Amino acid sequence: MIKHNIIITEFDTLYQILFELNDYLKFNLNKVNLKDINRVNITNSIIFSKFCYKNELLKKKVNLRKLVFFVEKGQVIKNINNYKFILYPFNIYELVEKINIQLLKKKYNDQSFVRISNYKLDLNSRIISNSNVHLKLTEKEINIIIFLKNNKKPQKVSVLQNEVWGYLSELETHTVETHIYRLRKKIIDKFKDNNFILSQNEGYSIK
């Protein structure tokens, strides 16, 4: 499986923490100095930096839509120009999960809409629709659907646990099954569709 690239600039502490977990990560980890940022290919990468380097990155004409800024503890910075922010301090396992979620979405080449059978899935608003019927989903539910759709064979709970929640997640198996059950029930209640997510002996799948 081809790994995506995560580039960390001017954030040595974060790099060192993730480097210790490198064997468990589903992405390639790279550290690049700010002065060299334009010498690397960032087309298929996600870049992480401290908020204080925002203006320097702008001067270098880096596409900030690929960035996640980390701000100092105590600062109150709301969403700015649709960029993503994670407040410091943060839970490293939650951070890895957020990264894995972004990489799952990138498998669809950053499309806003994904077609799944007779449904249209809006990744930005997290809404699945069929004709004029719409259903709001959680981010986790979106990622479950994307993962199942991206795999032709039924997926066992243990695989979902690893791939959607992340290898580092301290998660009980029944938590995954509960998420699947609730998602299937929402689809059935809203669309009267019992066959959107199929449950088989081999695992779960989307036709």
Image (tube, rainbow, N blue to C red):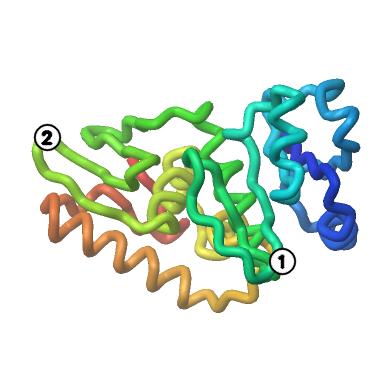
- From the top left corner, tell me how far across and down residue 18 is, in percent: 82, 58
Q: Is residue 77 above or below residue 206?
A: below
Residue that appears at 42% across and 61% down: 201
Place of residue 157 in the rendered image (x, y in percent of width and height, measured from the top left): 51, 64
User: Counting other residues with Cα less than 10 Å from the Cα at mark 2, is it few (<14), some (14-19), or many (20 or more)?
Assistant: few
Reading the chain from its start, which is encountered first: label 2 or label 1? 1
Provide residue 31's location: percent of width, then percent of height.
Answer: 88, 42
- Nearest the camera: 13 or 197? 13
Q: Residue at x 68, y 55 (%)?
A: 70
Tell me if label 2 and label 1 are in contact, CB under 8 Å: no
Q: Mark number for residue 131?
A: 2
Q: CA distance from mark 2 to mark 1?
A: 40 Å
On the question of residue 153 being in view, the answer is: yes
Can you identify the residue that label 1 sits on? 92
The residue closer to the viewer here, 133 or 74, is: 74
Residue 130 got which mark? none
- Say how many tags the image has: 2
Q: Is residue 178 above or below residue 113?
A: below
| Quadrant hosting residue 171 | bottom right
Q: Nearer the viewer, mark 2 or mark 1?
A: 1
Residue 18 as seen in the image, left or right of residue 81: right
